[in-house]
Image: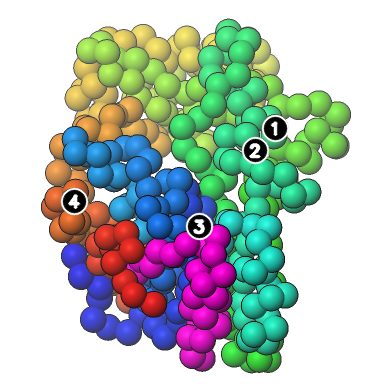
Amino acid sequence: MTPNDSARPLDGLRIVEVSSFVASPLCGLTLSQLGAEVVRVDPIGGAADVHRWPVTSTGESIYWTGLNKGKKSVTCDMRSEDGQRLVQRLVTESGDGGGILVTNAGGRDWLSYDTLGAMRPDVITVEVLGTHDGRTGVDYTVNAGLGFPMLTGPTDYSGVVNHVLPAWDVACGLYAALAVASAVRRRERTGRGARITLPLDDVALSISSALGYLTETQVNGRSREATGNDLYGTYGTDFETDDGGRFMIVALTPRHFRDLVDVTGTRDAVEAVEKTLGADFAKEAERYTHRAVLNGLFAPWFRSRTSVQVADALASTSVLHERYRTFQEVTDSGELEANPLFAELDQPGIGRFLAAGLPASFDGEHLFTGPAPELGSHHP
């Protein structure tokens, strides 16, 4: 895998990244894929995430290299005045496309917008915070304080269930990249720099508000109910097949639902239930309300067929569906090789593997970077 030869959208920008873990490094990775030169600065020996799992059998961090592809790496003693001056120089003395800092290492006066702005008036700083009131926080603590773990997991389980995807970190990293691009656009028009703060909990709150989780409690006076694997507000659930496979089935529209009824041969039973209940299953709210009855009608069809038979039958319908798979099954399926999002990467310390580029394609081409650097391999 090599960076694309054609001009990329952010060619000419230089980003200094002082960060660790997910949100800030993902911001830098995204900007790098879009063409920016990204210089990651770590303390000597690496930040706290340098050995984070998953790792290879020799202890190399697959996680670290994944989030730092295409970047340059500088290490210094950031507790010393010399190290601090070096970082400040990297940020402020990098030409028209420079003067940009992304960091989650907040609370450092020498790295603040005010300090850097005195050295370069058009400086742009993006500071990722834990919480809007200055407390520390990570994805899993933010999520715990928001409410999603109370909705996740089986409905007959009274405890909480964390999800394994750091969704707020991911969204925060992408918001940070958008903030950088927006601030650069404004600087080009006005010459002004920008002090941008992006609290992780505000990202979670903003998205939860937009999706209605917080609004419904204010308007309706109650929290959303836990639904297990049933999709809230419409018809969707999982079914087990004869050979132990599982499928997620979603019927968002009346057409989806009609096709699900037809493929499972339950038309007479569904219409009888609809009449008895006085329901109208053309309405997604009523499909959701009576989901337990519908689940019972559809389940025997899935249990009497293998995963292959179910997949073949559903393929000829509009029903939204997918078989549950492991990551190993995905990589063994051959679909990574067939997807232009992936290209072979030779990562020192890790080996050769298929790595994803930028999900968005520009003029039909996905944008890639080179491998992650060896820690501290570039000189400022």
> Which numbered circle lies on residue 145?
1
Examine the structure image and report whether residue 96 is included in the region drawn in magenta: yes
Q: Residues within 10 Å of mark 2 (few under 14, many from 20)?
A: many
Residue 259, image x, y percentages = 40, 31
Reading the image, the residue beneath label 2 is: 142
> What is the distance, in whole Å, between disc 4 and disc 2 at their CAs?
34 Å
Q: Amino acid at mark 3?
A: Ser
Would you say residue 56 is visible in this rendering? yes
Secondary structure of the residue carrying numbered label 2: helix
Q: Residues within 10 Å of mark 4 (few under 14, many from 20)?
A: some
Examine the structure image and report whether residue 172 is included in the region drawn in magenta: no
At horizontal 42% and vertical 21% (from top left) the residue drawn is: 238
Asked if the residue under mark 1 is in contact with the one under mark 2, i.e. CB atoms within 8 Å, the reply is yes
> Which numbered circle lies on residue 136?
none
Residue 174, image x, y percentages = 52, 59
Would you say residue 233 is visible in this rendering? no
Secondary structure of the residue carrying numbered label 4: loop
Q: Amino acid at mark 2?
A: Val
Reading the image, the residue beneath label 3 is: 19
| Quarter containing the C terminus | bottom left
At horizontal 47% and vertical 62% (from top left) the residue drawn is: 77
Q: Amino acid at mark 4?
A: Gly
Secondary structure of the residue carrying numbered label 1: loop
> What is the distance, in whole Å, between disc 2 and disc 1 at their CAs?
5 Å
Reading the image, the residue beneath label 4 is: 349
Q: Earlier in the sequence, mark 3 or mark 4?
A: 3
> What is the distance, in whole Å, between disc 3 and disc 1 at their CAs?
24 Å
Residue 281, image x, y percentages = 58, 26
Residue range in magenta is: 70-99
> What is the distance, in whole Å, between disc 4 and disc 1 at their CAs?
38 Å
Tag in front: 4 or 1: 4
